[in-house]
Amino acid sequence: MAHPKRKISKTRRDKRRTHYKATTPQIAVDPTTGEAHLYHRAYWLEGKLMYRGQIVMEKEEAVA
């Protein structure tokens, strides 16, 4: 198994880790329904799948 030849300093380690950031998701509000959702994503509203203010599909109820 490989072993490091020298100890990596805290500064060098932390410089590498600066690129790992949590980003906040962008939230959009649909102008027709007023529903908040993620950009470029379809969302469910009252049993209907909505995208860009239009109904994409309706949820089918399970028949027992």
Image: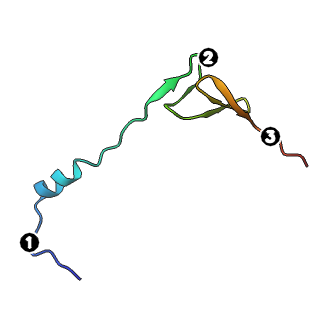
- Nearer the observer, 12 or 52: 52
Measure the C-alpha gap from mark 2 to mark 1.
61 Å
* Residue 18 x, y percent position in the rendering: 22, 47
Quadrant in the rendering for residue 1:
bottom left
Vertical placement of residue 63 versus 52, above or below:
below
Q: Label 2 amino acid? A: Thr
* Mark 2 residue element: loop
Q: Label 3 amino acid? A: Glu
* Residue 31 x, y percent position in the rendering: 57, 16
- Give the crowd class for mark 3: few <14, some 14-19, many >=20 residues within 10 Å: few
Q: Is residue 19 left or right of residue 47?
A: left
Mark 2 or 1, nearer chain start? 1
Mark 1 or 3, nearer chain start? 1
Q: Residue at x 74, y 33 (%)?
A: 47
Measure the C-alpha gap from mark 1 to mark 3.
62 Å
Q: Nearer the viewer, mark 2 or mark 1?
A: 2
The residue that disc 3 covers is 60
Q: Residue at x 84, y 45 (%)?
A: 62
